[in-house]
Amino acid sequence: MTPPIARDPDRLRTALDQLSGLAYTKGHGTGNDFVLVPDLDGETELSPDHVEALCDRHLGVGADGLIRVVGSTHLIEGRDLLAEHPEATWFMDYRNADGSVAEMCGNGVRVFVHYLATRGLVDLAPGQTLTIGTRAGARAVTRLEDGYSTDMGPWDYLDPELAKERASDSLVLAAGLEDPRPALSLSLGNPHTVVALPDEGDLQWLDLTKEPNVDPVPPNGTNVEFVVPADPLFHEGVGRVQMRVHERGVGETQSCGTGACAAATAVRLWAGDRDALQWRVGVPGGTVGVEFLPQPDGSERVLLSGPAALVFDGTMA
């Protein structure tokens, strides 16, 4: 995988100086944390250095990623999306902690919509649904009594022919594993590679401060999920999985929404039980729900549910 750009404290300090007066909010979804920057009129330019500096846990605010809260009309991807989804008037401009642009973030979507709802930018009561724009397409988010449920769209294989033939399409080696393990790569709007481990001891011994080696590497890189199915796998009809994740451009995070969807999808495929539609995925930051919705064309849409929280507001000095 592509090595990360070396952290340069002087470069980050310079970037932070340029952000004096910038208002922001800190939020998280099951421990997956974000800096939200309100830019309702699309006037704030955030360079990769700015994003990396804000997300730096020593010099900046600290986060797994940054969400620019912007109207869809103010960026090209948003305007293109509005042509097909005119209701998607808000766009989640998501960046990884290293400053790179990302297609989508499942936990970030919930935090983004929670920000819109709590700040009075949208009227969204429990049971109501809001459609927002992302680089992975429009996403419908429903407010629940205790969180939000997001229609993540259909899942797919990154390499359909190879995956269907072998139930795996790559090998992954991580610090803490003696040998490479077979893995399955899936798309949930962004790329994921899922590795099954035999027990939670193996899961806990992983050192995810180091980037796992994926062979072959998907064209746009990949997030890597390490999963342990529960024993028994199903309890009262609900599948259960424990997961840790190394996110591209970030490192290990407390949770990954699209990664949880990929983990449940892979374990469900390996178990050979397409009738198992309800799943609970445990992550270091909590638990999220995953539900599969079979479609008439044979595809399946995936719903992700979980909490969202805003922690504090601030202004860069």
Image: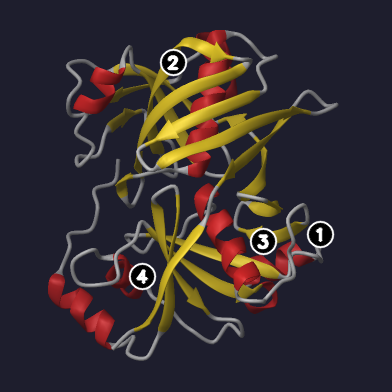
* Residue drawn at point x = 58 percent, y = 26 percent: 279
Q: What residue type is labelled 2?
A: Ala
Numbered badge on residue 133: 3
SS type, badge 2: strand
Where 195 sits versus 151, above or below? Answer: above
SS type, badge 4: helix
Nearer mark to the viewer, of 1 and 2: 2
**Could you tell me how far apart the alpha carbons at marks 1 and 2 are, in whole angstroms?**
41 Å
**Could you tell me how far apart the alpha carbons at marks 4 and 2 are, in whole angstroms?**
38 Å
Give the residue furthest to the right: 296
Contact? badges 2 and 3 (CB < 8 Å): no
Numbered badge on residue 213: none
Contact? badges 1 and 4 (CB < 8 Å): no
**Could you tell me how far apart the alpha carbons at marks 1 and 4 are, in whole angstroms?**
30 Å
Q: Quadrant of the C terminus?
A: bottom left
Q: N-terminal of the two: label 1 or label 4?
A: 4
* Residue drawn at point x = 55 percent, y = 34 percent: 261
**Could you tell me how far apart the alpha carbons at marks 3 and 4 are, in whole angstroms?**
20 Å
Considering depth in this image, is 203 or 183 the residue closer to the camera?
203
Q: N-terminal of the two: label 3 or label 4?
A: 4
Residue occupied by mark 1: 84
Residue occupied by mark 2: 230
Q: What residue type is labelled 1?
A: Glu
Where 277 sits versus 224, above or below? Answer: above
Q: Return the x and y of residue 70 as percentages of the image width and height.
A: 60, 75
Residue occupied by mark 4: 51
